[in-house]
Image (tube, helix red, strand yellow):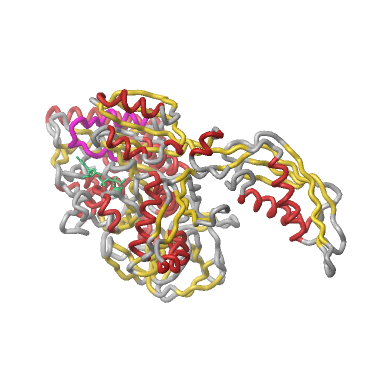
């Protein structure tokens, strides 16, 4: 897209007055998502450097990047929290969110995708699509977010651009359309749209040269194939082609943009974040091909009302992240409609009260840049206001509530004990804050020991949280070894009838219910249906029956783990004209549910992971033997260069400490990544061994 500057799709010049509508068309709010270590943070830093936002290029290995600014990120060389930065490219304002690749921090990807309009999916050119790529791809698909792919690390030995493109087609099932290819001589890229050669270090399309001779003929043939593919799916382009006999760059980019936004194709860019190759071209693609807020479907409230990206419309802004740290309280918001201004008093619909926007700012790494107002598509932080994740801000005169965030359920927990009296006194408040920042964490009291349990998405998630409690809140705790969060379910249907009656002077209590429990499909949770007839359980008490049964399910029946995948039906019961009340029905339902589950063959479910392991050939036998001792089922065994890759299906209870063990077994050369595949019935012996409260 070297010549894109000469053929702009929108005229979005900096510092020139343009109408509000075209100003929105000049906004891009995009995320970078990928598997661990694909190079998202390095690419973000390169982009900031290329657009002049940073003058000294930071590196992940040196702990000096803009977006990995948290000391825990710098120490580990990984991204933990999503971080937004803003820059300009060709008169467009781009808000870019760098997300973590590690599965333990999946909530950060989820909450980012929730508020983004487009995404750059980064692949490592040596490995192509990896397990977390599949996971983030599926999430982006769920949110209907248009994507471009950036094949990174072309400088690495073993880089295989074509293999990576194939993996996008084969594994992700997308129609991948490469817009650049590595030059046969290496070190540069051919831009197939504008027929130019891109060198490392070129920050914009101006630094490229036209292709000549064989190279031009090769690129022109590839360009013809791109046009052909697009004319098959884009009638407008076909019309232009039939009329003019050729397609100019502007018409081609226009058709590419339509096909990208509708998801019919996924453009593939390439380069190397490390040496700064292909970064300017990627920036052009973000501007030319990914949607502006105005190109996205209208946002829909829980009540079904929809809103256009109109800066003069009613205010609708979503709080997708709250952080409390050295800077104080910050809440990150994205505006969908209207304008959020400093000094405004707005309505926070979830808590149901008005709040005042004292300070509005854009964060850039650890720097704060004050703002007066933000409009549709923009992301900023509200400072000093404790608003929870999932809150919606709207006008007081027009309250709006957007659907809250989908939160992955915890799979492991540790029991924690404060080491000092001071830590004990601070623990409650510190936990409350940490949990409000990260909805994928939860805490509860162990019903048997009374200890505090901290639950999360993986070992690393819990380790980072314990570091945070210690470093940011001065709470030092002793933690048990991580244990798997089991669940309970039933294996057959059962019924139970309970009468809760109390008459001890004064108003009595009378609640009588007959409940049936039946196994439901895996992953469906708890459902409740009222099939009682003739008003035997008065309608006003039915919600209390449901609440009582759900409460009992959350507490667990057999071993204190939440009951899941059960269909509950209220079959009948009776009431008393004076003594019936909600509490009596809730207590009756609680007992009835517990008794019904007890006689419905309760079992424990354990989380089972898909584990992708890459090891040197020499270590294969040893690693497979170890996996066998961990109740693994090997699904695939492949070769990639000199390495062997294994895809296995392993219960999480067997994987505690696995990554560290694998590293020492392979002298640091083996790597593994895990994603939750589902829940399966756990053998009794395992439940006991893993410390399950049986
Ligand atoms: N050779 C080479 N190495 C790269 C390139 N881009 C990134 N790296 C290296 O890959 C490693 C991971 O880079 P990051 O930028 O932290 O990757 P990430 O995707 O942000 O990782 P997470 O946020 O932890 O998921 C670092 O050692 C980088 O120096 C590249 O283009 N070429
Ligand atoms: Mg990163």
Residue occupying the point 31% across, 23% down: 621
Q: Name the one closer to the observer, 350 or 431.
A: 431
Q: Is residue 162 magenta?
A: yes
Taking 605 as reference, is 645 left or right?
Answer: left
The number of callouts visible is 0
In the image, residue 35 lies at what x, y percent?
34, 41
Q: Is residue 367 above or below residue 286?
A: below
User: Is residue 19 visible in this depiction of the protein?
Assistant: yes
Q: Which residues are magenta?
A: 150-169
Q: Name the one closer to the observer, 478 or 496.
A: 478
Residue occupying the point 46% across, 59% down: 435
Query: Residue 637 lies in what quarter of the image?
Result: top left
Query: Residue 83 lies in what quarter of the image?
Result: bottom left
Q: Is residue 365 above or below residue 526?
A: below
Residue occupying the point 41% across, 28% down: 629
User: Is residue 317 visible in this depiction of the protein?
Assistant: no
Q: Quadrant of the C terminus?
A: top right
In the image, residue 546 lies at what x, y percent?
70, 52
Q: Name the one closer to the observer, 520 or 306.
A: 520
Q: Name the one closer to the observer, 295 or 384.
A: 384
Taking 673 as reference, is 62 left or right?
Answer: left
Q: Quadrant of the N terminus?
A: top left
In the image, residue 646 lies at what x, y percent?
35, 27
């Amino acid at each position: 897209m070297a010549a894109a500057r000469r053929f702009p799709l929108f005229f979005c010049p900096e510092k020139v007055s343009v109408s509000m509508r075209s100003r929105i068309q000049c906004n891009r709010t995009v995320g970078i998502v990928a598997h661990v270590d694909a190079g998202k943070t390095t690419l973000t830093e390169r982009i900031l450097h290329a657009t002049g936002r940073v003058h000294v290029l930071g590196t992940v290995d040196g702990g000096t990047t803009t977006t990995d600014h948290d000391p825990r990120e710098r120490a580990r060389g990984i991204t933990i929290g999503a971080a937004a930065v803003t820059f300009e490219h060709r008169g467009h304002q781009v808000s870019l969110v760098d997300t973590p690749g590690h599965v333990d921090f999946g909530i950060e990807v989820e909450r980012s995708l929730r508020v983004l309009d487009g995404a750059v999916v980064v692949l490592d050119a040596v490995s192509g699509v990896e397990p977390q790529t599949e996971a983030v791809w599926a999430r982006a698909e769920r949110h209907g977010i248009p994507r471009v792919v950036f094949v990174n690390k072309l400088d690495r030995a073993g880089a295989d651009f074509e293999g990576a493109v194939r993996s996008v087609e084969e594994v992700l099932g997308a129609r991948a359309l490469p817009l650049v290819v590595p030059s046969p001589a290496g070190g540069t890229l051919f831009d197939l749209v504008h027929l130019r050669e891109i060198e490392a270090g070129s920050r914009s399309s101006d630094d490229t040269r036209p292709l000549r001779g064989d190279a031009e003929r090769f690129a022109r043939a590839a360009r013809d194939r791109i046009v052909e593919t697009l004319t098959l799916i884009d009638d407008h382009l076909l019309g232009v082609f039939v009329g003019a006999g050729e397609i100019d760059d502007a018409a081609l980019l226009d058709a590419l943009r339509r096909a990208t936004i509708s998801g019919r194709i996924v453009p593939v860019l390439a380069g190397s974040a490390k040496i700064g190759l292909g970064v300017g071209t990627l920036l052009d693609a973000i501007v030319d091909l990914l949607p502006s807020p105005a190109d996205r479907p209208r946002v829909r409230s829980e009540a079904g009302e929809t809103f256009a990206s109109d800066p003069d419309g009613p205010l609708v802004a979503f709080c997708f992240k709250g952080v409390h740290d050295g800077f104080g309280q910050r809440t990150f918001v994205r505006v969908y409609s209207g304008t959020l201004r400093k000094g405004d008093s707005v309505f926070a619909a979830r808590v149901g009260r008005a709040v005042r926007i004292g300070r509005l700012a854009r964060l850039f790494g650890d720097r704060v840049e004050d703002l007066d107002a933000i409009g549709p598509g923009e992301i900023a932080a509200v400072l000093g206001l404790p608003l929870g994740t999932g809150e919606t801000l709207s006008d007081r005169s027009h309250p709006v509530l957007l659907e809250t965030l989908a939160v992955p359920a915890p799979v492991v927990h540790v029991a924690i004990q404060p080491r000092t009296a001071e830590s004990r006194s601070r623990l409650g408040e510190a936990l409350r804050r940490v949990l409000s920042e990260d909805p994928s964490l939860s805490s509860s009291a162990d019903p048997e020991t009374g200890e505090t349990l901290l639950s999360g998405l993986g070992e690393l998630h819990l380790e980072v949280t314990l570091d945070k409690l210690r470093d940011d809140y001065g709470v030092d705790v002793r933690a048990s070894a991580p244990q798997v969060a089991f669940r309970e379910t039933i294996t057959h249907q059962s019924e139970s009838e309970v009468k809760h009656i109390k008459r001890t002077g004064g108003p009595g209590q009378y609640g009588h219910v007959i409940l049936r429990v039946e196994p439901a499909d895996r992953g469906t949770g708890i459902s409740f249906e009222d099939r009682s007839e003739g008003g035997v359980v008065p309608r006003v008490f039915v919600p209390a029956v449901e609440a009582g049964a759900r409460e009992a399910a959350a507490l667990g029946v057999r071993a204190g783990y939440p009951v899941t995948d059960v269909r509950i039906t209220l079959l009948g019961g009776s009431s008393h004209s004076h003594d019936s009340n909600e509490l009596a029905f809730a207590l009756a339902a609680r007992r009835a549910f517990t008794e019904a589950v007890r006689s419905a063959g309760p079992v424990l479910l354990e989380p089972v992971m898909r584990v992708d392991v890459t090891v040197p050939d020499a270590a294969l036998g040893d690693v497979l033997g170890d996996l066998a001792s961990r109740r693994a089922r090997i699904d695939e065994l492949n070769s990639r260069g000199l390495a062997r890759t294994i895809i296995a299906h392993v219960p999480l209870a067997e994987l505690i400490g696995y990554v560290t063990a694998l590293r020492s077994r392979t002298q640091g050369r083996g790597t593994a990544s895990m994603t939750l595949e589902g829940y399966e019935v756990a053998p009794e012996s395992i439940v006991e061994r893993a410390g399950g409260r049986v």
